[in-house]
Image (tube, rainbow, N blue to C red):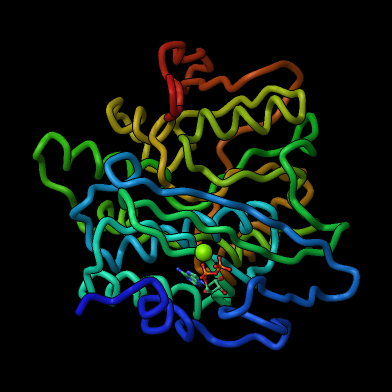
Amino acid sequence: MSLNEFDIIQQYFSSLTQSRKDVMAGIGDDCALLVPENGKILAVSTDTLVAGRHFLSDVDPASLGHKCLAVNLSDLAAMGAQPCWVSLALTLPEVNEVWLEKFSQGFAELANRHKLQLIGGDTTSGPLSITLTIHGQVEKASVLKRDGAQDGDLVCVTGTPGQAAQALKNINNGSFVDEQARKALDWPEPRVATGIALQGLATACIDISDGLMADLGHICSASNLKAVVEKSAVPGCGNDDALLDSVLTGGDDYELCFTVPEKHKDRLAQIAEQTGVSISVIGRMSEGQGVEIIDDAGQIIDMTDKHGYMHFS
Ligand code: ADP
Ligand code: MG
């Protein structure tokens, strides 16, 4: 006999992740009861992944379980918050136990690495869709926002953005996808440790979900400044313009883009070393608006018809 809603919750989700001391009640009551640390503020974020829109229906369910959590953890990382609790609203077209087992294991592996407890959710039937709400905690004084960039700050990125978009492009046109790019697409690693290490150093931060141009653009508009990015300083750009396109406008990377005063430049290498995630300085903030990409001669590269991914556009 097929499992009902309560069997699914019981079998796959009720004890999926580790228990935290700050959870008074988790799965099983009408609400989860959570005890935040004294003096900290809560950082809360929700993301939905819809089959056919954010992922293909036949994607490896373990990578889907990982990725839906990774994109939410990435939002906490962008604000320098420590992950604590997550709820999961799952809409399933059918009860497929092999799928549920793999999905929940992919989810649990990443959750447990970040000491994150699954504290509730909802289970419904319908077209496959996954919504997570994640909660983190952070000191009020050191939270990273988008609006704090200052004139003269360095613009930095973690890792090598663009690989996920390149992998997707190659999958769609049937060309070879190398291992590293596929990993960036299916198993992104949220930069939680880097975000926390940037507390008190970065003046603004965002995670790259819609492409470097678009997301750095959000820092620019929130901070009322311009970013000038040197093409040759952007990791992975090289001289390949197709690659430049993926790097600048491709989404789904979940690297961090942040601004930092030049006086903290030396700290960046230490943070990269300590977290195992590279950091590259790619440009500088200045007076003005928007994002400018310049070539080695200092000429502005025309990017007018290029923007990040947008729903309903
Ligand atoms: P309610 O009827 O109050 O909405 P539900 O019957 O939907 O409660 O869920 C029962 C319990 O299981 C609740 O504590 C809810 O948070 C939890 N829950 C439901 N679905 C999930 C899920 N997919 N993952 C984790 N917890 C879940
Ligand atoms: Mg319910």
In the rendered image, the quadrant that contains the N terminus is bottom left
Q: Quick check: can you spot residue 249?
A: yes
The vertical placement of 152 against 313, above or below, is below
Question: What residue do we see at 72% from left, 76% from top?
Answer: 33
Question: What residue do we see at 79% from left, 29% from top?
Answer: 151
Left or right? Give the position of 141 relative to 204. right
Q: Position of residue 171 (x, y in %)?
A: 16, 42
Q: Which of the 4 quarters of the picture holds residue 153?
A: top right
Left or right? Give the position of 79 relative to 72. right
Q: How many marks?
A: 0
Question: What residue do we see at 55% from left, 37% from top?
Answer: 282
In the rendered image, the quadrant that contains the C terminus is top left
Q: Position of residue 204 (x, y in %)?
A: 72, 43
Q: Quick check: can you spot residue 163?
A: no
Q: Position of residue 174 (x, y in %)?
A: 9, 39
Give 91 or 101, whichever is nearer the viewer: 91
The vertical placement of 147 against 295, above or below, is below
Q: Position of residue 170 (x, y in %)?
A: 18, 39
Left or right? Give the position of 252 relative to 152. left
Question: What residue do we see at 58% from left, 51% from top?
Answer: 46
The vertical placement of 246 against 61, above or below, is above
Q: Which of the 4 quarters of the picture holds residue 143?
A: bottom right
